Image (cartoon, grey):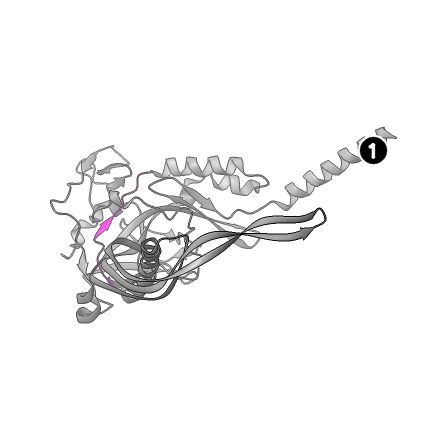
Amino acid sequence: MEDIQKSEFKKACANCGAELKFKPGSHQLTCEYCGYEEFIEPSKSSFEELELAHYLKIVGENAYTETIELLHCKNCGANQHVEENYKSLNCVYCGEPLIREDIETEGWISPGALVPFQLDAKKAQAIFKDWLNKIWFAPNNLKRAALDIERLHGLYLPYWTFDANLRASYHGQRGDYYYETQTYNSDKGRRTRQVRKTRWTYVSGSVDGFVDDILINASQKKRKEIPAKIAFWNLKDLVVFNSKYLSGFVTEKYTVSLKEGHHSSFQEAKNIAYNWIRRDIGGDTQRIANADIKLSDETFKHILLPVYLSSYRYDGKEFNFYINGQTGVLSGNRPYSFWKIFFLVLFILVIIAVFAIFAK
């Protein structure tokens, strides 16, 4: 993969000289000051699937194809990169201040592709506000926080994807249900009932096929994982990596190594193989005694996927809210206002007391 030159990271407006930023839902850079727009030229080639064996055995799990400037959050461990110049920045996960002087240069395996943001910050904020308006007993400060667009950060998350040809030979048993009539005694006399039983037959065979884009989260830190509810992206929208798509957003560096990601992907491939085997065995139920699973022609990509994140502290606890930057799906753990619940319960008790008095 070619090195990305540093000159590509920041793009000045041809009109006024301000910094251009990526416009979500398009393939354009735009100037927030004068409205100038510039198209991101599509790549003439498709994104590259890298040979896994080469990186793991020859170059090594820490193979780097370029360097990147990172700010490391001392509170939650996130490694964050920002394309544009800035004077101050808070961690997108925990809100702790990040200091420009603490910047470090690290190597990374360059992204091969990314899914660009489809939602801009205003649309994401509207989704967040709509969700807050529907939940009960939310603290007033939380609803006011939804009005502050500065609390909402666009973040590209790192993922590994793995492809391989899979072949598995197996031994096991096929179970077919059948029913027998049984007689039993009850309070109403002798009765009959149908009892399900299973007829087991020894089987063996093999399955094979192509496993495409096993997705492994490449971020691991002290914070909680990205909620499963929002972790679904349409990878058909992947485009060849171009640093211009990162402008205006924070990019997180992977902390799960390629070797660790590959290990996790094999567990996913194993689950896929077992599903194929069960389908191949057929019947009503299956037992798999053993399976010899082999992967060949393995390739991988480092990709970036879009998410909006907002963090909020209430009563000494941290709450995070996530919006999928492609689909708009939202997930969050919300706080409850003690006083709102207290006064509602008090109001209900007063109403019950009034009814009780008038009922006498």
From the image, tell me which residue sits under label 1.
356
- Residue 105 picture location, percent across and down: 26, 63
Q: Quadrant of the C terminus?
A: top right
Q: Does residue 10 show up?
A: no
Residue 63 in which image quadrant: bottom left
Vertical arrangement, residue 356 with respect to residue 240, above or below: above
- Determine the residue located farthest toward the top in the rendered image: 358
In the image, what residue occupies the spot 55% across and 47% down? Answer: 335
Direction from residue 282 to residue 27 in the image, left or right: left
**Would you say residue 118 sits in the magenta stretch?**
yes
Q: Of residues 304 and 29, which is closer to you in this image?
A: 304
Q: Quadrant of the N terminus?
A: bottom left
- The amino acid on which the numbered mark 1 sits, given as a three-letter code, is Ala
- Residue 299 picture location, percent across and down: 20, 59
Q: Of residues 280 and 295, which is closer to you in this image?
A: 280
- Residue 136 picture location, percent across and down: 58, 39
- Residue 11 picture location, percent across and down: 20, 45
Direction from residue 303 to residue 191 in the image, left or right: right
Q: Of residues 104 and 1, which is closer to you in this image?
A: 1
- Determine the residue located farthest toward the right in the rendered image: 360
Q: Which range of residues does the magenta coloring cover?
A: 107-119
